[in-house]
């Protein structure tokens, strides 16, 4: 099969087209003939040598795919060979065929194309597991999304808005802020020209927000602590601004704050299966009804994966960057 491999750690050009044997299926896995795959920030980190491949996972990049089931034991899953599915995987998505745990597969939502379905798993699993499971965003509570125009950001804004929450989002330009508002954010905050702490405090009459989804870390940490309401929760999922920041422990004690975080890739199949079931029950109907939609910025053919990574690193995009596989 054709695939994109990382020939060495470095710039996007190290991504090269190659020939690989078909994946060997493990217990509980199915083989998907890939129609499309998502490009995600962790793929960039892996290419740079900063995101180690979990033991037993494919060394090929790519954490989400959609396509046709062509092999594997399907048991009582309700799927049949030939069905179109999307799947979260630990790697191997940049290829014509990809092995995926059956428990991490979901049907293509009604009304969506296979390309659109391929844009769902990585961000939807991440948002649900962190915002609604780990941070426990509950009815009546408010959410601040850092990096609202990213793939994670547009997903978090839409799901939280569709479920009735007030949402605020930061982004790096006025145009991106408007895009966040068009997706449901009450306010898009330009982090280059505005102080998100001040804007959020003003919009919430000084209270702050209940949950912050943070992909930045670094010097955002002390400002985020001040932006949280009493009993608020900060969940960190990436460190684009650095791994170290100052933490005022007195505020955590006095205001009963929670600072937590997680990465999805190394979590066990059982956990991801639970999240898949939650998504199918709670979010797939929102996709079918059009209340939530995949936001695709640009699509590249598989052999242009390097160009897709260059776009990702430029941060010029709003939403998802995708690869199509012929």
Image: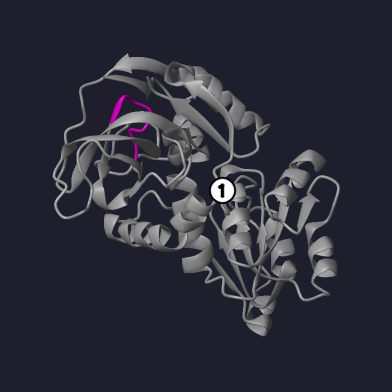
Residue appearing at x 42%, y 47% in the figure = 109
Left or right position of 213 against 29 = right
Q: Quadrant of the N terminus?
A: top left
Secondary structure of the magenta portion, mostly?
loop
- Up the image or down, 236 lies above or below 182; here it is below
The residue under label 1 is: 152
Q: Position of residue 148 (x, y in %)?
A: 66, 49
Instruction: Give SS at disc 1.
Output: helix
Left or right position of 283 against 68 = right
Q: Foreground residue, 215 or 284?
A: 284
- Up the image or down, 29 lies above or below 250; here it is above
- Crowd band around label 1 with a 10 angstrom C-alpha radius: few (<14), some (14–19), many (20+): many
Q: Is residue 94 covered in magenta?
A: yes
Q: Position of residue 231 (x, y in %)?
A: 63, 79
Q: Is residue 131 covered in magenta?
A: no
Magenta range is 90-97
Residue appearing at x 42%, y 32% in the figure = 37
Q: Foreground residue, 238 or 162?
A: 162
- Up the image or down, 253 lies above or below 194; here it is below
Q: Quadrant of the C terminus?
A: top left
Residue appearing at x 66%, y 34% in the figure = 315
Location of residue 200 by image quarter = bottom right
Q: Foreground residue, 318 or 57?
A: 318
């Amino acid at each position: 099969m054709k695939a994109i491999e990382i020939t060495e750690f470095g710039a996007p050009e190290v991504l090269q087209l190659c020939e690989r044997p078909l994946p060997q299926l493990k217990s509980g896995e199915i083989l998907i003939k890939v129609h499309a795959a998502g490009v995600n920030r962790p793929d960039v980190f892996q290419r740079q040598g900063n995101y180690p491949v979990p033991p037993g996972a494919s060394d090929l990049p790519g954490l989400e795919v959609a396509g046709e089931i062509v092999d594997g034991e399907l048991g009582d899953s309700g799927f049949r060979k030939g069905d179109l599915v999307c799947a979260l995987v630990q790697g191997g998505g940049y290829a014509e065929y990809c092995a995926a745990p059956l428990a991490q597969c979901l049907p293509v939502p009604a009304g969506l194309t296979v390309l659109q379905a391929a844009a769902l798993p990585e961000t939807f699993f991440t948002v649900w597991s962190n915002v609604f499971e780990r941070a426990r965003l509950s009815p009546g509570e408010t959410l601040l999304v850092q990096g609202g125009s990213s793939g994670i950001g547009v997903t978090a804004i839409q799901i939280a808005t569709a479920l009735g929450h007030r949402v605020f989002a930061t982004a790096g330009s006025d145009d991106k802020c408007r895009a966040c508002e068009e997706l449901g954010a009450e306010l898009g905050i330009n982090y280059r020209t505005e102080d998100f702490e001040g804007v959020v405090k003003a919009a919430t009459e000084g209270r702050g927000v209940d949950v912050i989804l943070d992909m930045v870390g670094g010097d955002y940490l002390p400002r985020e602590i001040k932006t949280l309401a009493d009993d608020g929760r900060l969940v960190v999922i990436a460190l684009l601004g650095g791994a170290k920041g100052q933490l005022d422990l007195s505020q955590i004690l006095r205001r009963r704050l929670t600072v937590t975080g997680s990465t999805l890739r190394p979590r066990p199949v059982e956990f991801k299966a639970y999240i898949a079931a939650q998504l199918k029950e709670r979010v797939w109907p929102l996709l079918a009804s059009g209340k939530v939609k995949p936001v695709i910025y640009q699509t590249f053919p598989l052999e242009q994966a390097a160009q897709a990574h260059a776009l990702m690193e430029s941060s010029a995009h709003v939403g998802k960057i995708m690869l199509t596989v012929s």
